[in-house]
Image: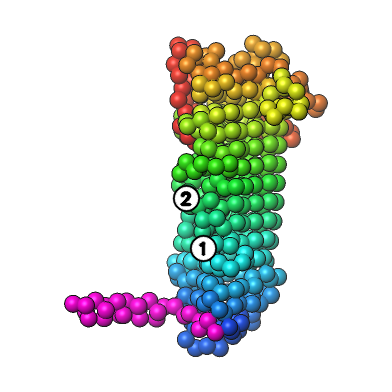
Amino acid sequence: MKSFLLLAALCGSLSAAADEYITAGDGTIYDFGRLAAIAESGVQPAGDAAYTLTKDVTIAVGDSFDIEQSVRVGLADGVRLTFKGGARLEATRVVVAPADTSAGSTCAPYGIVVDNSTHATNVSGFVFDRCGLRSMGRCGLNISRCDFCQHNGVSGSAALLMGADGAAFTVRDCHFTGGQRSAIGGAANYLNPVVIERCTFIANGQANRNAPQLNLTVADSVVVRGCVLRGDSSRNMVGGIVVSNLMNFSGDYRTLIEDCHISNHRFGIATYMRQQATLRRNQIVNNCFEANPMNGGSGINIYDPNSQQQAHIEGNRIELNLWGITVIGGQKVNAGRTDVATDDADYNPGQNTFLNNGFDGMVYDFYNNSAATVYAQGNYWLSATEPTADAIEQCVYHQADDAQLGPVIFSPWATDPAGVAVLRQTTATAGESYTLDGRRVQGRCHGLVLKRDGGRTIKLMAR
């Protein structure tokens, strides 16, 4: 019996090896030209500065890879290129794409895997066309000037998939468009510090699953700065940014999302569970494509039934979402506190601008669906018919509407910022509204009719 099992294991190993070429690990420096000179590698020339990989190739520990500055690499169906040894992946232009691009082709390659646990790998100048980039090493990646186009989902739940636990990442000046699933993501049980700056994320999530374009887990530092995220409104399950602590890790996890433009999603930004989140100077507009408002549509959603999250919300433009800000739990949610000294740790000038968040004739700029007191002072309540407490009250749902909820302290508020007072007339023309930069928006989102009277408590879902 033991001999039979050993024979079966060997057969399985030989079968797997037939579909993969692994370098010897003897210190050789490879590029695609050198691999193509090895008959059994499965790497074949395909024209000038072009190669095709017909099977998996792994650069072993001990070897290294030096990418050509300009090259096109075609991968056969399901094929991946893995770097376990060192790799220099900084180039002028490298296109990684399906080997078969003929009409009707079902060729769906995996892409590139970096599994280096000795140092961070720099990746720049790549175009990942209908394939992905996955990190499995402990040292992470520094990625710049890369395009990820129409990720096919074969390499995992994101075009750029982060791991292993503790690996750190930077992603700068990259573009992610039309992927089947999330653009950037990682495992819920891996804490990956990440900085994402000056990137664009357009219409990812084409499979229309319940996942955002950026699907991140908390870490010592998670930063998303100066990015543009625009959704495909026909994909009504796809959100903008989520930073979550679904495993309920204990620790001081800091999240910063600032200076981003987030539009046309199921929801804008959601922070889940324990973390210290700072959300500031973001433009969060028209994230209203959830069919049922009970399941989503928030510009900003703070979700933390364990009351461990601290959130600082400042200087955001929150417009044309089904809900402006929704608070479901949280230890301390501060959307503006001006009744303390400016050097007080709780001081927050507010400066958030709320306009036309709601549906079916109801305004929901701020919804406190928790028992906690929430401060929202110093903000611009442009949905209000006039800058008075009674008018602003009609834009806020809290203890005054349901005694089981905590209050939203919105007084004192800010007066209209110069140049946008005209926005109070945005609904003067039937069926039309205008954004803060003067663009006309047609076809507001519609959902369920909600009433403030009758003492009914509206329970929001997490998204």
Q: Measuring 49% from the left and 43% from the top, which residue is drawn there?
A: 249
First in sequence: mark 1 vs mark 2 = 1
Q: Measuring 63% from the left and 22% from the top, which residue is drawn there?
A: 375
Q: Position of residue 170 (x, y in %)?
A: 65, 56
Farthest front residue?
251
Q: What element carries label 1?
A: loop
Residues 244 and 106: in front is 244
**Image quarter (top left, top right, bottom left or bottom right) of the N terminus:** bottom left
Q: Name the residue under label 2.
A: 189
Residues 60 and 385: in front is 60
Q: Give the range drawn in magenta.
A: 1-26
Residues 315 and 294: in front is 315
Question: 10 Å neighbourhood of mark 2: few (<14), some, or many (≥20)?
Answer: some
Looking at the picture, the colour scheme in use is: rainbow
Q: Where is residue 261 in the image (x, y as percent from the top left)?
A: 67, 42
Quarter of the image holding residue 349? top right
Q: Mark 1 points at which residue?
A: 136
Q: Is residue 18 magenta?
A: yes
Q: Where is residue 426 in the image (x, y as percent from the top left)?
A: 68, 25
